[in-house]
Amino acid sequence: MKRVLVFEAHGDDMEFFAGGTIAKFAAAGHEVTLVCATDNDKGSFELSAQEMRAVRDQELLGAASVLGVKRVIPLGYADGDLGYADPRVLRGQFMRAIREVKPDICMTWDPFTHYEGHPDHRAVATAASEAMSFAHFPNFYPEHADDGLPPHYVGEHWFFAKAPRDQNKFVDIDTTIDRKIEALCQHEAQMVLTVMDLQHHVRASGLDVPFLAGRSAHDFAPVIEQMMKRAGEAVAKRSGLGCRYAEGFRRARFGGIEAWAPGQTIAEDV
């Protein structure tokens, strides 16, 4: 059994980019923990910030249950403002989680991706990447040891990869695509927002997309299913796995030590 720790900015980040993979990790008996940095209180065209905060935990826990995530840790930062929080404090919170959970694999947003427009994603990417890289160095946040949390080494770093050029690890999600979609649909407020945002794009563009233009945003499940299956098919075509649906990541592991061991391979977990 291995431990997997995911750092996300918002409820649904993990599901969109790695829901099928996380479901496979859990089904294989690996233990998955999720850290969600923000309270999701900006993610609606209909609900107030207070109403969004009220449903956040219900949606997070519902999606986690579908995927088999063992534990969810919400940090409660204001949605949209994470980029303006103290980065050293955020990094310390992430490093504390690593030292507590002791993961073999960490997964998060990619700090080196191009054209990432969301400040929360950028903040999580930087803080998590640094925490993953330095959690085994005892002089980073030495106060953690006083709390019984010694340094911990994270061997595998998996990053959500939006751009095909960044993907070097692919996972066949044929058996878990439906759970990925079901988990996303647990984030009802976020999925209503997703459809409404697509409808904004349609109206502004002047294009004719009846499937979106005439739809109630609360009838979001067919839209999410189509989005995720199209995306999964596109990744699968690039993957060479011979599957119908796949997810792609930028993965770095064990500091590139494989170059020192020619002819040897590391077993894949999914």
Image: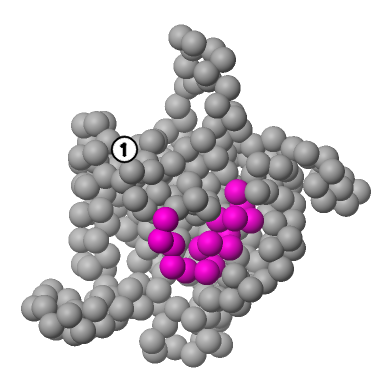
Examine the image and state in which quarter residue 185 appears: bottom left
Residue ID at (34%, 50%): 163
Q: Which residue: 49% across, 66% down? A: 11
**Toward the viewer: 19 or 266?**
266
Task: Quarter of the image for the C terminus: give it.
Answer: top left
Asked whether residue 192 is drawn in magenta, I would say no
Residue 73 x, y percent position in the rendering: 63, 60
Task: Residue 137: tell me if it is visible.
Answer: yes
Measured along the vertical axis of the image, is residue 138 above or below residue 162?
A: above
The image position of residue 67, as x and y in percent, is 44, 52
Side of 110 relative to 103 (left or right): left
Asked if residue 118 is among those painted magenta in the image, a careful observer would answer yes
Residue for badge 1: 172
> How is the protein colored in the picture?
one colour
Residue type at mark 1?
A: Asp
Secondary-structure class at tag 1: strand
Instruction: Locate residue 170, reporting x and y percent.
Output: 35, 37
Pick whichever, 31 or 168, lies toward us.
168
Query: Where are the magenta residues, as a range?
Result: 114-129
Q: Quadrant of residue 135?
A: top right
Q: Residue at x 38, y 43 (%)?
A: 166
- Name the magenta segment's main secondary structure: helix
Q: Nearer the viewer, residue 205 or 192?
A: 205
Above or below residue 77? Residue 73 is: above
